[in-house]
Amino acid sequence: MSTESKIKARQALNIAPDNKVIISFDGGGIRGIFTIQLLKKIEEIVGAPIYEWVDMVAGTSTGAIIASLIANQKSATEIEALYEDLATKIFKDRAFGNRYTNPPQFDKINYRAICKDIFGNKSLKNLGESSGIDLFFTAKDMVAGEETFFTFFNKNESSKIVDTYQDALMRAVVEATMSAPTYFQPFERFIDGGTTVYNNPVMAALMEAFHYNGKDKYSSDNTTVFSFGTASLFRFVPLEEIAEPKGLDVLFWLDYVMDESSKDASEMQVNFLRSTLMKGLDFRRFQLSLDRESIKKLPNKSLRKLDNIDANSLHQLSNKELAKINMADVNMLPLMKVLGEAVADFVQEKNGFQSDLKGENKLVTGMDSDYREKLKKHLQKASWIDKLPTA
């Protein structure tokens, strides 16, 4: 870790000189290419790769891949090249594979081989000690029925705390955390860390840093946190489709519950960290909801021709087209890349990554006050309640 780079980063990003810096990455499949564009912009602003000035990285699933590559001392441009190669080679349908009728949809053979090429047999401890970066990754252990945190913290020699899985191979950890059910075969007992509430790992990472293995180094009043989403499809379901979903009900509800539980958990964490409950914390969240209202705020960039997308520029994208973006469609990599570039340019203009992206600069759409007023009136009427179907 470079002292000169740490000074440059803190000056360029308006970070208190003595603050520790934690960067946390959400999961999201191929949408991780979106996040990488923001990292490239930050490195451009700072003039140094992130691994030279960050103190801790945390990640789930695709976010863990990005975080681990930073710890492996790769620049954002190098991460982008590795990521695109990885995505195009692993998201290939298995013969007769189908998420619903014959899972898993994809074979991890290429993923395992590429991760072995990248990390060899380095453990978390090897990677953390060589880079000087503290590490935090998530996976769900189905046998134990609990979320597993794979961690390594560089400590003083006098510290008696030992990270439980510090000797686990890095390539095992990044396979465990990305093994999303129905998409990939479980990694023995482990499935994707984002399957439940840890798709956004920021709260768990801070808990580990402030109260457990990192408590001698980190506290809320000496830490700056960058939390990166992967662009989220915020689903406003038409009223008529709630009782009568398009397609099979079970598939609609399976996807909805998985997506929304992860989104809601993430938003709860973000709201908590933006509150005054975590005193002194310098928290900065960067996320985009994939809807026209948010995208119209971005600089309009041209799009190359894509299957099932008629738009020639970002501002021409319809909500129906945006709804086609999913975590496993590599055909959407170019679109997600352009969206990431546009958000990076937007953030550079608005606050230069020097503060949280909220208020009028927020790029996450929510229902307006008119909607809530109408709903409030409905809920006060007995006649409205009594006429709703019961089966």
Image: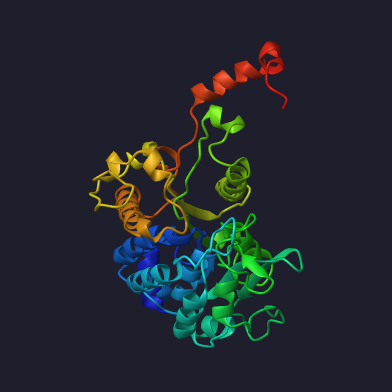
* The quadrant where residue 37 appears: bottom left
Instruction: Give the percent coordinates (x, y) of residue 159.
Output: 68, 81
| Front residue of this view, candidates 322 and 93 | 93
| Front residue of this view, candidates 40 and 248 | 248
| Front residue of this view, candidates 90 and 4 | 90
Instruction: Give the percent coordinates (x, y) of residue 300.
Output: 25, 45
In the picture, measured across the screen, residue 13 lies left or right of residue 276, that is: left
Identify the residue at the far front of this view.
Answer: 96
Q: Quadrant of the C terminus?
A: top right
Instruction: Give the percent coordinates (x, y) of residue 124.
Output: 57, 81
Query: With respect to residue 34, does 381 lie above or below?
Result: above
In the picture, measured across the screen, residue 184 lies left or right of residue 85, that is: right
| Front residue of this view, candidates 212 and 219 | 212
Identify the residue at the far right of this view.
Answer: 144
Looking at the image, which residue is at 51% across and 55% down?
A: 282
Q: Can residue 165 be seen at all in this image of the molecule?
A: yes
Label count reads 0
In the picture, measured across the screen, residue 315 lies left or right of residue 148, that is: left
Q: Quadrant of the N terminus?
A: bottom left
Looking at the image, which residue is at 68% across and 85% down?
A: 158
Instruction: Give the percent coordinates (x, y) of residue 170.
Output: 55, 80
Q: Can residue 14 be seen at all in this image of the molecule?
A: no
Identify the residue at the far top of this view.
Answer: 383
Looking at the image, which residue is at 51% across and 54% down?
A: 283
* The quadrant where residue 175 appears: bottom right
Query: With respect to residue 314, does 210 lie above or below?
Result: below
* The quadrant where residue 239 appears: top right
Looking at the image, which residue is at 61% across and 40% down?
A: 249
